[in-house]
Amino acid sequence: MPRKRIAFARIAQESNALSPVTSVLEDFERTHLLYGEELIEVCGPNKREVKGFLKNAELSGFVKAARSFGDTFELRPIFSAWAVPGGPLAREVFEGFRDRLIEELRSMGGVDGVFLSMHGALCVRDLEDAEGRLIQSVREVVGESVPITVTLDLHANLTRRKVDGNTLLCAYRTNPHRDHFKVGQRAGRLLCQTVLGQVRPVTAWRTLPLILGGGTTMDFLSPMRAIYGWMKRQERDPRVLYVSLFNCHLWLDHEEMGWAVHVITDGEPSLAEEIAEELAEKAWAVRHQQPPTFPDASEAIQQARRARLARKLGTVCMSDASDMVGAGGTGENTALLRAFLEEGTDLRTLLPLRDPWAIDALWPRKPGERVQLTVGGRLDPARNAPIPIDGTLRCNVDVEGFGRISVVDTGRLSLTLTEGAAMVMQPSFYRNLGLSPWRADVVVVKSLFPFRLYFALHNRKTIYARTFGVTDFDAGLREDHFSSPVWPKDPVDDWRPTDRRRRGIVP
């Protein structure tokens, strides 16, 4: 019996539509861009799928699931393109990825299944709902009978194009995200079972006019913990194949943004509809629980100064919440740097800032030299004022994933200037530069949630600082234009009219 052929690929980036910095091909080349056999090689046992960031992610999970069926499946890797979050992707780059994916699928002369790893919150310059269009293009090539499985971040924005084009849609279930591999494995197994005719997926979904709610939205904290627990209990029924909840990325440019739910059952459409309806109600019920408010830079520094025991036993992790590179911030917000230079000179601080132009100026210089230069105010000058720096060059280092990095010591503050996106969320970022998080009073990160996992051994107190930028929770509500009222920007009593319109259901 001939082996079943499954093609797989990844195109993934979380985009911030409010950022003026366009993401380009080099952002993928710097982080993760693999083709063909080199992709399947990194998805094997004891490999690192996304070097410098993730050991095992969705594609590794898919490969393991498919191989658990013995020699039943022939895996056909196409490519994997992943970049750290940033501004909208250049259209020509997206179209280049799309064209290569379609060309490779056509050249295979037919496949039995397709597995795609995406984010679900990718913005492309001058192209609305690019990921939905991509799924549609794949469907047109492989035909209606070939199952397509798509994995998405739980911050994806679900649209009709995304839902209609695929067979199986599976989201992360943890926030901070720590189940990439598990989701890929579950989704991969369902795809294999679908190809073999062992399951018959049917789906239902709902979309809510809800942008902010659910408190912190962490899966292990109230109120989301109860909802995720309920979702797991539904999946104990063997007829329920997968239940997804999407909290929606806050900084997109889609006029129909919002939370959404998606349910897959094995040949039970009525059950799928019932679960989707109830889950949507549970999500809507937590809309009044808004995220916490954050102190400004000055108060954040005062809180760190008062946390004497935390600094003695470890370090204080301070998230620049208005410039989270993990949510597409530019990484060059200078407000926190200015505050530390003016008010926090007594605190041993490690702080990152993206400035390729400063790197060009510092790269010819030698460690130990005194340097004077201006940093910031180049990527997003309307929001970030430049700051003069006077200090000592500690080192110039080329780091995979970040590009060139220069470290300048200005008193008790070590400023780490990066050429690429400064997605600082792991202690290894600083350790690789000869800087010790253990010895620092304050370690600044550019992440909302993931740093809590990576810094668990070091972090004794977490402080989020609001410095006003493109990743403020209300930034999207201030600047985005929606096609209908959304909570909490507008008063909305009933989610169903918006849901029915978005799903194309005529009253």
Image (cartoon, rainbow, N blue to C red):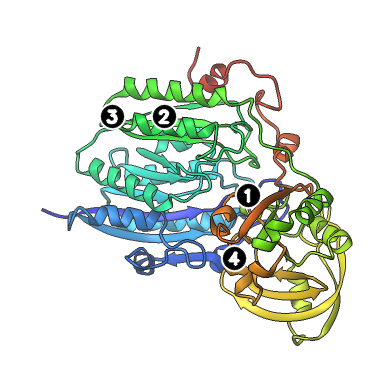
What residue sits right under mark 1 in the picture?
448
Mark closest to the chain's N terminus, 1 or 3: 3
Q: SS for tag 1?
A: loop
What residue sits right under mark 4 in the picture?
427
The residue carrying pointer 3 sits among few (fewer than 14), some (14 to 19) or many (20 or more) residues within 10 Å by Cα, namely: few
Which of the pair 161/369 is nearer the observer? 369
Mark closest to the chain's N terminus, 4 or 2: 2
Left or right, 180 with reference to 122: left
- Asked if residue 312 can be seen in this view, the reply is yes
Mark closest to the chain's N terminus, 2 or 1: 2
Q: Where is residue 152 in the image (x, y as percent from the top left)?
A: 46, 44
Q: SS for tag 3?
A: loop
Amino acid type for the residue under numbered disc 4: Pro
Q: Where is residue 438 in the image (x, y as percent from the top left)?
A: 64, 68
Mark 3 and mark 4: span between their CA atoms? Answer: 41 Å
Specify the label residue 53 is tagged with: none
Amino acid type for the residue under numbered disc 2: Trp
Specify the label residue 230 is tagged with: 2
What residue sits right under mark 3 in the picture?
237
Q: SS for tag 2?
A: helix
Q: Is residue 341 above or below residue 19?
A: below
Mark 3 and mark 2: span between their CA atoms? Answer: 12 Å
Q: Residue at x 48, y 67 (%)?
A: 51
Mark closest to the chain's N terminus, 1 or 4: 4
Q: Is residue 396 above or below residue 271?
A: below
